[in-house]
Image (spheres, rainbow, N blue to C red):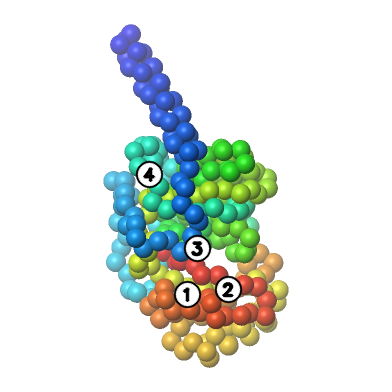
Amino acid sequence: MADWHRASAHRAASVAVLSMAAMGMVACGHKRQPQPVPPTATAPSVYNPPSYPAPAPRPSTGGIPVTPVPEGGISAEDKEFILSHRPIYSEEGSATWYTAPYKGRKSANGQVFSDEALTAAHRTLPMGSLIVVTNLRTRQTSAMRISDRGPFVPTAILDLTKASAQSIGIWPGSGRVRVDVYETPKPMDVGGRWCVQIGPFLSERKAIKFKAKLLNDYPGSKVIEFAGERSYWVRIRPAADDREQAEEMARRLQPEEGVAYLTRLD
């Protein structure tokens, strides 16, 4: 029994040392300048914990399969991976926090949204990406995974759950952060399934009118309009969800209201 207690204490001490080491490593930062599009020169490493099911085959323009994240957002394997690897991409910008407008609302990855999970929303990082977010004012850091899409405001790059925002000291409120990407289940620089989300529109009539214009201007694309929280949005998916076409659309579109956001679906 004494040996068991000593082994338990040794494991607890090891975990504490690893946690302190992770905080120190992330605080040192990654010195690359932020870029709006991930670089093509660095190929992201792929880390797939055994408990994560492989995505099912799907048609190029069909529904997006569920991309699960561990319970609570981060697993013990994720923390170990961060300790033994360096970031593959970094960017800086403003982060905000958000919550679901109703109970049971699903995140974009297909799982039910949770305020208590260490997850975040990003417009273009592959779903399920493992990131470490650093509060640039206080240097507080936390690991989390991308499970949702947003923020759809031009002034922010990341939306955090309540738990994620609290873990880096910006709840309630917002703050400037660095996002270090450690692992992406899919490549950042090639492939992907892309669209453009336009809004917000203050009236459903204007959203439907803009949808009709897009259907006329981009035949062969899939266009929908949908209601947000006290607003309306339009989403256009180019043929085969092609990234280059989506990027060109985002540059060309000039809605009467809102902004056109390039967004990755998978």
- At mark 2, the secondary structure is strand
Q: To which residue does mark 1 refer?
A: 247
Q: What residue sits 46% from the left and 29% below the top?
A: 20
Pick the residue in front: 58 or 239: 239
User: Does residue 97 appear anywhere in the picture?
Assistant: no
Pick the residue in front: 91 or 265: 91
Q: Amino acid at mark 4?
A: Arg
Residue 184 shown left or right of residue 146 in the figure: left
Counting residues from the start of the chain, the first of labels 4 and 2 encountered is: 4
Q: What residue sits 49% from the left and 60% below the top?
A: 35
* In contact (CB < 8 Å): disc 4 and disc 3: no
Pick the residue in front: 155 or 184: 155
Q: What residue sits 58% from the left and 43% below the top?
A: 135
Q: Taking 171 as reference, is 212 above or below it?
A: below
Q: Quote the CA–CA distance across marks 3 and 2.
A: 15 Å
Count of numbered marks: 4
* In contact (CB < 8 Å): disc 3 and disc 1: no
Instruction: Identify the mark at residue 36; answer none if there is no mark.
Output: 3
Q: Amino acid at mark 2?
A: Ala
Q: What residue sits 47% from the left and 47% below the top?
A: 31
Q: Position of residue 262 (x, y in %)?
A: 51, 70
- At mark 3, the secondary structure is loop
Q: Amino acid at mark 3?
A: Pro
* Mark 4 residue crowding within 10 angstroms, few (<14) / some (14–19) / many (20+): some
Q: To which residue does mark 2 refer?
A: 260
* Mark 3 residue crowding within 10 angstroms, few (<14) / some (14–19) / many (20+): few
Counting residues from the start of the chain, the first of labels 3 and 2 encountered is: 3
Circle nearer the viewer, 3 or 2: 3
Q: Position of residue 165 (x, y in %)?
A: 59, 44
